[in-house]
Amino acid sequence: MKRRHIFQMGVLSLFGMGVLLSMVAFDPPGLHRKQELLSLSVILRGADSASWPARQGMEQAAVDLGAELRFLALDRPNHAGEQSSLLAREVEGGADGIKSDMSASGAVACISADNAALGEALGRAAINGVPLGGTVLLLDSVPGSSGMAQRLSQAARILEENGRRAEALGIPDAHDLGEFLSERYRTDPPDAVVAFDSETLESAARLAREFEKPPLLYGMGGTNVVVSGLERGEIMAIASQNEFAAGYLAVEAAAQAARDAPQQAVEPLPFLISRQENMYDSNHEKLLFPVTR
């Protein structure tokens, strides 16, 4: 018999490969259970927000740990209402139960880079291309998220301490990103833009091609689109991490929770700031172009 459990990938408070793992209901204490095949539903923030290495990591963990994966994508990236609807549908479809308050503090395990360190690193990266007194626009793609708030606040602190002006732009719906940025680029263009998740970074890179002199672009992400943008010089620098490992650890933590196994402490994922000039150095190349099994 298969039992379905749910974890969420990249929901409101976590970005890139951040993962919120939901605590599920288990059999009554003392009841002996076999190591049954698990069915894990993965809720993605966008139509295809997990990078290929991340999917490979999840799929490998599923093979190793006796689980089946079901990927569910949102029609509207980061849309909280649609996420809630998907959760309800999965529960009604046979999940044992789910507890999710959409915050890292309520998660069984959080697979993510250190949000504060990531924001600080991207803020320092942006300083290199922005003159004193220049403006850096920080894209808040999920307003109200604790993880996003940490990234923005630390990036803003570093920029302002170094004589640059940091400005946060809240984008409640990713579908509005093009409209938000196009208007800003025409009326009051910033010197640089920082995006803190792959989907927003990809959208900002596509929009930049429509302008003769777009702002410098920095961000977080490891998708093929993001890496190609870095290679072409459309993106100045990105925070990159081991996407395969992130995917594997996410499924591993979900399986442990579903089987009521003791949760192992998960350290924040390490990351590097990759630029066009160093992206083919050994350490960076391993993260940007991983060879997976």
Image: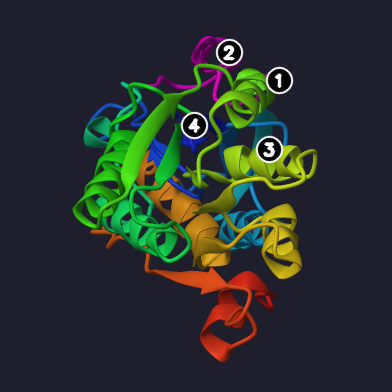
Q: Is 101 positioned to the left or the right of 227 in the image?
A: left
Nearest-to-viewer mark from 4 and 1: 1
Mark 3 nearby-residue class (10 Å; few <14, some 14–19, many ≥20): some
Residue 49 drawn above or below residue 77: below
Of the numbered discs 1 and 2, the one sitting upstream in the chain is 1
Q: Is 154 positioned to the left or the right of 224 in the image?
A: left
Can residue 148 be seen in the rendering of this structure? yes
Tell me the kind of residue under disc 4: His
> What secondary structure is found at the residue carrying circle 1?
loop
Residue 287 drawn above or below residue 165: below
For the C terminus, which image quadrant?
bottom right
The label on residue 82 is: 2
**Does the residue at mark 1 contact the one at mark 3 (Cβ under 8 Å)?**
no
Tell me the kind of residue under disc 3: Ser
Tell me the kind of residue under disc 1: Asp
Q: Was residue 85 drawn as part of the magenta stretch in this picture?
A: yes
Residue 285 position by quadrant: bottom right
Residue in view at x 50 percent, y 22 percent: 171
